[in-house]
Amino acid sequence: MKRKLPQIIFTPRVAKRKSTKDNPFARYLTNGYFLFLAGIVAGCFISGFAKLPDFLGGATRLAAILSGAETFEFGSYFLECFALCMTTVAIVFALGFTAAAAPVIYAVPAFRGIGFGVMMTGIYSAFDLKGALVCVVAVAPYAAITVVSLCVLSMDAVLISGSLTRFLFAGDVSGVNSGRLRGYFVKLFISSSTAALGAFVHCLGVRILMPAMG
């Protein structure tokens, strides 16, 4: 006899839609954006109190490029940004195959937001009003697309992790099937493509703003 597992955060079930307006991904994306924005605010406070140049991470590299101290090579900078995005995507993908991993998966947008908050604070500190322009044109679109990239994969990662949890602890095999796994790999491709788009938009924004930063 199957044991029932409590409906706690790491064992989500897919609710039946009551209407066409009830879109699970739209709700998940909204929650992801709230977590992401909270992370950005936290990143701004952290970087403001830390006062450590090395803590700025990507901001120091971007500041060097915009100030002319470092040569801007579109291809190499794109690969660097894309690799950073794909690292986060790969972490989410791996967590999907980990039981009870939903709390960590939910937190990923917030952690990524902290990185963007630190980056924007560093750029604004280095260039003042021009730094704000960089944040609006080059960083904000990059951040927005990154959240979509993470949420596309994170929603399925939570469901896969929940199915694995129910299988391990309650013997429920209803959520473990090849169709869901195939869909998960499709979402990985979509998420990776979206991450590439975000990196490209960021690099294009930097390219456009470079003449104005001199």
Image: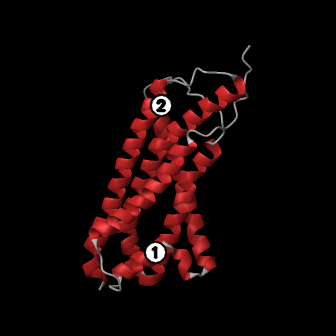
Query: Residue at 57% across / 60% down in the picture?
Result: 39
35 and 61: which is toward the camera: 61
The mark nearer the N terminus, 2 or 1, is 1
Above or below: residue 125 compared with residue 74:
below
The quadrant of the image that shows the N terminus is top right
Mark 2 vs mark 1, CA separation in Å: 37 Å
Residue 137 vs residue 123: left or right?
A: left
Amino acid on which disc 1 is placed: Ala
Above or below: residue 106 compared with residue 159:
below
The residue that label 1 is drawn on is 59
- Res 111 quadrant in image: bottom right
The residue that label 2 is drawn on is 181
173 and 123: which is toward the camera: 173
Amino acid on which disc 2 is placed: Leu
The x, y position of residue 145, in whole percent, is 39, 54
Residue at the farthest top position: 1
The x, y position of residue 202, in whole percent, is 34, 64
158 and 138: which is toward the camera: 158
Determine if residue 12 is in view. no
The x, y position of residue 65, in whole percent, is 35, 79
What secondary structure is found at the residue carrying circle 2?
A: helix
The quadrant of the image that shows the C terminus is bottom left
Residue 193 vs residue 2: left or right?
A: left
The x, y position of residue 21, in whole percent, is 44, 30
Q: How many marks?
A: 2
81 and 23: which is toward the camera: 81
Density class for disc 1 (Cα within 10 Å; few <14, some 14-19, many ≥20) is many
Query: Residue at 69% across / 30% down in the picture?
Result: 7
Query: Residue at 43% across / 26% down in the picture?
Result: 20
